[in-house]
Amino acid sequence: MTEEETLAALADPTRRRILDELAALGEASATALAAPLPVSRQAVVQHLAVLERAGLVSGRRQGREVRFSVRSEALTSTASWLTRLAERWDGRLAAIKRLAEGGAEASAEAAAPTADEVSEKKDVDDEADVENMS
């Protein structure tokens, strides 16, 4: 599973609510999950299929029912990515704060591009060079 698949699955508010319900219950059938939701059982089954493909839930057959549970390990890489993103923004916001408070060093730091920004600019410049050659 990639972060993109995980985030795409979590983009839907109904799927997030299903995941929250499963986390609270530990394990539940689609019928039990549909009860508090404003959607049909069949819609819940479709949402569970998306969550299962993204690796966020797993289902196991118990008699005639399929019981679903959260696979928390699937969230680990996405949580790590979000943590790195938050740290990057925290650093930028701290630099802006120092700049706003009048620090000369903060001004230079805030103006200096990050390594990612330099790499992105180089990629854009390289693409422009290729287009100009055409």
Image (cartoon, grey):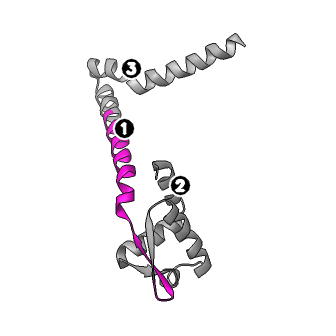
The crowd level at tag 2 (other Cα within 10 Å; few <14, some 14-19, many 20+) is: few
Spot occupied by residue 101 in the image (x, y as percentages of width and height) = 28, 28
Q: Residue 40, can we see it?
A: no
Nearer the observer, 114 or 44: 44
Disc 3 from disc 2: Cα separation: 34 Å
Query: Does the residue at mark 3 contact the one at mark 1 (Cβ under 8 Å)?
Result: no
User: Which dot, 3 or 2, sits closer to the camera?
Assistant: 2
Q: Residue at x 57, y 78 (%)?
A: 38
- Residue where numbered disc 3 is placed: 111
Nearer the observer, 40 or 93: 40
Q: Is residue 75 above or below residue 39?
A: above
Dot 1 amino acid type: Trp
Tag count in the figure?
A: 3
Magenta segment, which residues?
A: 62-91
- Residue where numbered disc 2 is placed: 8
Left or right, residue 77 beside residue 98: right
Q: Residue 87, can we see it?
A: yes
Pointer 3 or 1: first along the chain: 1
Q: Residue at x 38, y 47 (%)?
A: 82
Disc 3 from disc 1: Cα separation: 15 Å
